[in-house]
Image (cartoon, rainbow, N blue to C red):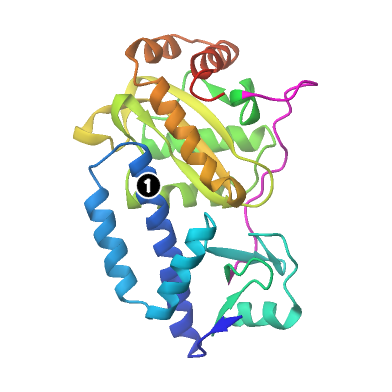
Amino acid sequence: MHYHSMETCQMKQIINQLIQLQVLTFTLDEQKALTSEAYLKDLETSIKNLSETLPPDIVKLFHQLSGRYSSAVVPMTNDICSGCGMSVPTILAYEVKLGNKIIQCPRCTRILFYRDSLPRQLKRIVSGTKPATGLERFSCSKLMLPNLEGKTRDEIIQEMIEVMASEGFVEKPDELLKSALNREAIVPTAVENGLAFPHVRGIEGGGLIFSAGLKKQGVHFGAPKNRLTKIIFFIVIPLAASAFYLNLITGFMQTFSDAAARDRLLDCKTPEKMWQVLNHLTKKNIP
């Protein structure tokens, strides 16, 4: 399925605008989940303005798909739709790469754009013989950093990504860092109570995974009123887990709205203790 046929550069601009529209929509949903009103009006205005620059039928299609899927616009890598995993027929794959039409996946009907390669999750969290529950589905003690060394937001995000990569959970750390900082440039992921949720969406394969880090003296992360951030969760989100990500951060927000819970986590001195305490504190809100 395809819409329009026009100059390649013009269509590529439209596809890039659709990707931007999707990112802004994700960001608006995040801010609502974080009960952060600071940027809602600006985000809604940006979404409205960007929508008005696009052809009406393409905007209508985007909203129809957004009502069915968490991601309406998805990359095609190695001639495979990253939304549903279907191998895209050769003719359509060629047209996606050419970029002069809006091409939809024949199976899931998501809008496709070409991406040469995506960062991948290399292995899943394995918690033992019992079915994983709570945070055990998404992380482990090796991804806990009770004493972050980075002195700036960017250094801290890089440090957390490098731990994920060194433990064999993700690849292409430089690409992940670039994506994370691009996301921060839209709206800071730091919120009230000294929390921040930097993240990267749309990696290939695997499931949602996070690392957690503590900066006990605090760091400027873009929080409201320039408050310091002390507890950081860096989250890598595959397309299939986009919707659940909001449930995870909501659970963290509910848990650490309590000052005693924040203090207890910040008291941890080893990765093992931090993992143990984090699991205990979130048991109710992230079952």
**Residue type at mark 1?**
Glu
Residue at 34% across, 43% down: 31
Q: How many marks?
A: 1
Q: Secondary structure at mark 1?
A: helix
Q: Quadrant of the N terminus?
A: bottom right
Say few, some or many: other residues with alpha carbon within 10 Å of mark 1 (under 14 / 14 to 19 / 20 or more): many
In this rendering, would 265 be left or right of 138? left
Residue at 38% across, 39% down: 33
The residue closer to the viewer here, 230 or 67, is 67
Residue at 62% across, 20% down: 141
In the image, residue 13 above or below residue 213: below
Taken as a whole, is the magenta stretch helix, strand or loop? loop
Q: Position of residue 72 (x, y in %)?
A: 52, 63
Q: Magenta residues, as a range?
A: 113-133
Identity of the residue furthest to the right in this view: 129
Q: Position of residue 186 (x, y in %)?
A: 34, 52
Q: Position of residue 22 (x, y in %)?
A: 44, 60
The residue closer to the viewer here, 1 or 80, is 1
In the image, residue 67 above or below residue 140: below
- Please name the residue that numbered disc 1 is placed on: 184
Residue at 75% across, 79% down: 90
Q: Does the magenta run of residues contain 57?
A: no
Q: Does the magenta run of residues contain 119?
A: yes
Q: Position of residue 67 (x, y in %)?
A: 48, 59
The image quarter in which residue 32 lies: top left
